[in-house]
Structures are given as C-alpha cells and as structure tokens.
Amino acid sequence: MTDRPDPYTLDITSASFVKACGGPCTDGCVTLARIGDDVWALGDSKRPDASPLRFTTEELSVAGIDPARFGLGA
C-alpha cells in the first residue's frame, strides 16, 4: 500500500482540462487534466457540471486511456 493522498482531496479548481474525441466532437468528448504527480481527473464534456472522476496513470492505462492522446505527457 502506498502513502499517496486520496485523489479526491486534491484541488482541481485551476486544473486545465484537454478534450479528446473518439468521433465527431459534436458528440460527447472525454476531458482529462493532470492534477498531481501520477494523478488525473477525467470528465465528460456532455456533463460539465458533474464532478470528474480521478485516476492514477496506471489506472488510466488499464482502461486504455493514454494521456498522450490528449497532448499530455504521462
């Protein structure tokens, strides 16, 4: 077990989200922002008021989400 802080305690008010679309961007797109060392916030452009989910880089990788697709380095 790591001593990593709970990702949901990290402040994301100044996070810079980047959008990536799997198809036409008129449909919903996924948004992603780095919010800490090895921690990401994943949102849904169709639901901008919904709180983004938070994941580690490893968890994103397991889900098949590559931050590089968003122009973000892992």
Image (tube, rainbow, N blue to C red):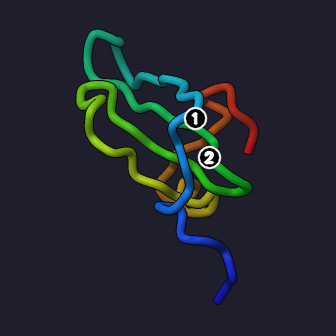
Percent of width and height locating residue 19: 48, 23
Which type of secondary structure does the marked residue at label 1 adopt?
loop
The residue drawn where x is 30% and y is 29% is 48
Disc 1 residue crowd, few under 14, some 14–19, many 20+, Cα 10 Å: some
Q: Relative to the observer, which residue lies in front, 35 or 62?
A: 35
Percent of width and height locating residue 1: 64, 89
Which type of secondary structure does the marked residue at label 2 adopt?
strand
Whether 23 is drawn above or below 60: the answer is: above
Percent of width and height locating residue 32: 52, 36
Question: Which numbered disc, 2 or 1, marks the residue that appears first in the sequence?
Answer: 1
25 sits left or right of 6 in the view: left
Q: CA distance from mark 2 to mark 1?
A: 6 Å
Q: Which residue is mark 2?
A: 35
Q: Which residue is mark 1?
A: 15
Percent of width and height locating residue 56: 59, 60
Q: Relative to the observer, which residue lies in front, 24 or 43?
A: 43
The residue drawn where x is 38% and y is 45% is 52
Q: Quadrant of the C terminus?
A: top right
Kindly indicate the quadrant of the structure image that contains residue 6.
Answer: bottom right
Disc 2 residue crowd, few under 14, some 14–19, many 20+, Cα 10 Å: many
64 sits left or right of 38 in the view: left
